[in-house]
Structure formats: structure tokens, C-alpha cells
Amino acid sequence: MQSEFNLIKEYFTRPSKNADLGVGDDAALVSASPGHQLAISTDMSVAGTHFFNDFPPYFIGWKSLAVNISDMAAMGASPKWATLAIAIPDTDKAWLSEFSRGFFACADAFNVSLIGGDTTRGPLNISVQIMGEVPNGQALRRDGAKSGDEIWVSGSLGGAALAVHKIQKNTLDAKKPSDQSLVEKLQHPQPRINLGLALRGIAHSAIDLSDGLIADLGHILESSQLGATIDWSKIPHFDSAPENLSVETIQTFALTGGDDYELCFTAPSNRHSDIINIGKSLDIPLSQVGTIKANEGLIVLDDKNNPISIKGTGYDHFK
Amino acid sequence: MQSEFNLIKEYFTRPSKNADLGVGDDAALVSASPGHQLAISTDMSVAGTHFFNDFPPYFIGWKSLAVNISDMAAMGASPKWATLAIAIPDTDKAWLSEFSRGFFACADAFNVSLIGGDTTRGPLNISVQIMGEVPNGQALRRDGAKSGDEIWVSGSLGGAALAVHKIQKNTLDAKKPSDQSLVEKLQHPQPRINLGLALRGIAHSAIDLSDGLIADLGHILESSQLGATIDWSKIPHFDSAPENLSVETIQTFALTGGDDYELCFTAPSNRHSDIINIGKSLDIPLSQVGTIKANEGLIVLDDKNNPISIKGTGYDHFK
């Protein structure tokens, strides 16, 4: 069987653009940019919990890095360096080759250098740490929301969760374009880095939507000790036309479904037109879906301004 | 069952001394020191591969961080920040409490701040990333060895491997002081940070001994494109007096046994006395065990200067 050192050489060693010393020593060496803070985050992906075992390895590689880059987007940081620790049950060359192809495709797309790693034997587990940079004091934090802020989300919500639902119910039709786009949402998330960078100095707070809007907006509200109202009619949800779903089900997917990796952010109403222009220039749909309130609590209103009760409050591995 | 967010709050959130923003946002924020490079490394620990399932959780916590800090020692870097991603099959409060107690005991001992993390459900897997700092250009690398360098090791070698051997053979006597010290070596490694810092500007190359002297020195030789001779008589091996082992077995443990987390480094002979003094001032045994040679290849000589053939070349998860 192939050695750990050869595995790293063959599949995970590339010239590291942004590094003084890359893969192959006890540690990598990098130089931080003056006047910047380092933004550092880690996300672990486990087979069966974060992706189906038959997920194509290319997309496991892409997504395991993309979900980390999404945390940089949520901070308004530029991603620069990543490390990868991976446990694999055996050295399946075809799997490793496709996994690393997807991982590096994501790294190249966002100008991230893989600077270190560890491969070991064990149940499939992929642990990535991402490091990025943000000018001193300009990071988009969860605790900066202000009463009266408008609440915005990018893209559309609930598509990834619907894809998971259809895969579990075995109702996904790989030939149907609408189902293909749902699977694309789930397997091939596109972190909103350019949006995060554009929101520096404009947004008061931001978070990426990994656990569902209600759960993730809830983190902003908790950190900022504020409340919010959301207008269901303004929520940009997945295209439900090809589906035969009740409004309640659509609401559940769009408001509590995880894995969309869109951004939710809050900004003062006097920046409304600036944000519209950012969306146009980046060609990213941006929707104002509610308002931050001084009183704690999160209320979702239907089009008659009646509160909606929503099942579940987002994905949590331990609930 | 307890939520992922509460687990992080209860067991893994502490005030982060060295961080601008610690656990609880999409990413942590830290400020790098001017004139320094960042040293970054990651190590994953898997139940059954890196520790026995009945390993006390306190020591799983200690060791999962200590093996990462050891990589900072090998670079001559000061460890500062760590992230922890952990997959656990269920929320066993007693286990988590002991694990985090051991993890933070190690963090406090080496002035490391846990600045970020991820908890998820899955087969037990602990992935730690460590970040430290080293003054520009002063890192101890693997590729800096020079022909004629003296080869040094700290502490004693083979004790951890013998502990593993006795646990597997069920011959370990928890009441025997000599066996207790073997288990201490295995479960409670002490990264040689102070030694790594003292060797800046003196050592030409360094590595920490995680896979055994022959394998790890082999990485220095490969990176530096040089060879070496080792004198068995100079190898500071574990106390074999209480054991009934053949010389060949003692040599195998001392030369190819992993998990010692001592340092192996090379330095010019004119720094010999400086290194002796460093060992005295830090109260760390330092032994000169061989010499770097211009010709590639690693030869171990017995006390009659005859080459010894050694079974195995160190621990590799995929051999």
C-alpha cells in the first residue's frame, strides 16, 4: 500500500503561490500583510453527516474547501491559505485523484494555496482550515447589527435542502434540469467572496447560511442582542414551480434548510441603493427580506402580516 | 441531545488571550507580529490509529494538541493559536469534559489560545491546526542540513513505542513504576518548544520525532539531499534495564519507534559546546548521535563500526 508521504506528494502537493514555505516541512511558513488581521476558521466534513457516501469525490473535494471559503466571505476577508487533514479508510487512487481535482479546482477559483496537510487512515473525514486577511477593523462580524438595519440575503434559499430531501426520498430525477440545478446547489456551492469584500464598510454584520436562515440570522441576533422581523413574501426561495409542494413545505426549506452558503447581512437603510448597485455590478441577486428590531425574538410574517410558525430552526448535528 | 452550538459554548469556549476575536463568529481574527513569519501545521488524531480507544480522554485532549505544538518546536516557532475540529459519535459529557480539560491544560502550558472550532457527529476524529510565529528567516527547516553537521536528538527514544507494544501484548503492569513512565511518554508528550527557540541561529535543520528517528532523519536527508551515519552506542534509548529485550528489539524501538516527540536537529561542529550549554540551561538531555555525510544514504553503526540492519523504517499509516 502507498505510504502516507507518497500520498501527500502525489495528490496534495502543489507549488504554493502565497507561501514562503509550502507542504513538506514540519510546518508551512507564510507572511501576513501589514495593516491586516488574519481571519481563521475550520470546518470538518464527515461522510454520512455532511455528504452522502455516493457523492462524487470531485464535489466532496470542492465542497470541503468551499464551505470554509464561505466563512471568509462572511467575514469580508480575502481567503489566502488552507490546510487539509484527511482520514481515509484506504488509498483508493481514483477517489483521491478526483477528490484532489475538485479541492484544487476550488482553491484555484478563489486563489487559495494549500500549504499543509495530514493524511491518515480512518473513517472518511475531511478537516479543512482556512486563513484569510482583512484590513484592520474592517471584518464583518456577527455582533455589529443595529436596530433598524435592513436584513439582506444573497441568491436563493432552500434549494440545497430540497436536493437532500429528494435524494433521501429517492425522488430525484437526474435527467430533469430543475433537479440537476438543485443537485448543483448542494454539491457545488459558490462562496460569495466578492460580495463579502464589497460589503466592507457598508454591512454592520454578516454570516453565511450553512444551517438555514432562521438559525444563522439567530446567531447575528444573539451576538448583537437584538430581534428581527422577516417578510416571507420577500424571501428569494428556490424555484418551486417544478415541484408539487405545500407553502408550508416551501417555507420550511427556504427558512430552515441548510447548505445554501449564501450570505445574510444587515446594513443601515441609507445604504440600500449602494447594496442594490453592488448586486447589479457583481450579478448576484440581493434581496432585502426584513428588518432588525430592538426587541429580541425573530418573527416571520406572511403577506397578511400574520406570524408564521416554522418547523425546526435549522440544521444542528446534535439535535 | 445537546446542540452543536451549546457543545462549543460549554466545552470549547474560553477567553482568547492572543486573539482580536475568538470562538463564536464565522472566523476568528488575530494580528500577526511585525517582522515575523507565521508557521502553520495540522495533525489529525483518529481513534484506533493514533490512540487506543480506552486512552483516558484527558490525555487524548492533551496529546492531540501537543503533537501539533511539537511541529512548532521543530520549526523554532512560538505557538500562539490553535483551532480544533472534532467529530464525536455522541455527546458523552464526562468524556468531553475530560477531553477539553486535557486540551486546555496543554494550551495553557504552552500559551496557546483556542480561537476556533467545529464539532460534528461522526466516528471519533480530532483535527487540530496550530499557528505560531518565528522571526523572518529564522525558522528551522528540514532542508538546511550541511555535510559535516553533527546530528543531535533530545531526550530518550523508543519509550512510547515500547509502551504501545506492551499494551498490545497485554504485558503492561500499571503498578510498575518503569511501565508507568513508559505510558507517561506515550500519553503525555512534552513538546520541546524551549529547545526549538534556543536552537534558532544555531541548528541548520530540525524535525520532531513522530515516526521514528530513521524515518524522520530520513526526511531531513531527503530535503537536504545528503546522507548520514548514526552511532548506535550514542543513541539515548529508553531505560531497557527493567525489560527483558534483545539488543535487536531495543534498537528497533529506539531507531524506528514513533510517538516520542523529541527533536532531531543538525548543527555545525563548532556549535557543539553551545548546544551542550543549551541542554544544561534547559535541563533537557541532548545527545550527539551521528554526522551528516555528503553521500546519500543512512547508515547505523554498532560499537565495532559495523553497519546494523534495522527492521522497518518508522511508522506510516498506509504501509
Image (tube, coloured by chain):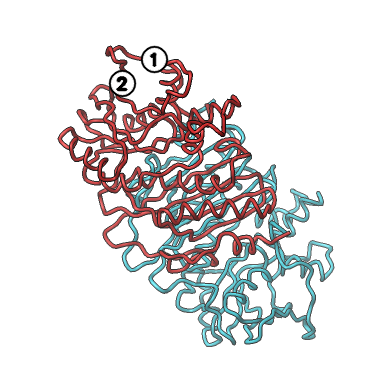
Chain colours: A cyan, B red
Look at the picture and state if B248 lies above or below B21: above
Residue A78 image offset from top left, x and y in percent: 44, 63
- The disc, 2 or 1, on the residue closer to the chain's N-terminal end is 2
Residue B70 image offset from top left, x and y in percent: 40, 44
Q: Is residue B16 left or right of residue B39?
A: right
Q: What's the distance in space between the residues labelled 2 and 1, CA to CA? A: 15 Å
Q: In the rendered image, which quarter contains the N terminus of chain B?
A: bottom right
Q: Amino acid at mark 1?
A: Ser
Q: Nearer the viewer, residue A313 or A232?
A: A313
Give the label on residue B309, or none: 1
**Residue A310, can we see it?**
yes
**Pointer 2 with pointer 1, Cβ within 8 A:** no
Task: Give the letter of the chain under mark 1.
Answer: B
Q: Nearer the viewer, residue A95 or B121?
A: B121
Give the label on residue A106, or none: none
**Residue occupied by mark 2:** B233
Q: Amino acid at mark 2?
A: Ser
- For the residue carrying disc 2, how many other residues have a C-alpha within 10 Å: few (<14), some (14-19), or many (20+)? some
Residue B47 image offset from top left, x and y in percent: 60, 40
Residue at 63%, 63% (x, y): give it.
B5
Which quadrant of the structure image shows residue B238? Answer: top left
Tally the numbered discs.
2
Residue at 58%, 66% (x, y): give it.
A208
Q: Nearer the viewer, residue A56 or B276?
A: B276
Task: Give the letter of the chain under mark 2.
Answer: B
Which quadrant of the structure image shows residue B123? Answer: top right
Residue farthest to the left, as pictured: B270
Q: Nearer the viewer, residue B127 or B55?
A: B55
Residue at 55%, 63% (x, y): give it.
B13
**Residue A108, can we see it?**
no
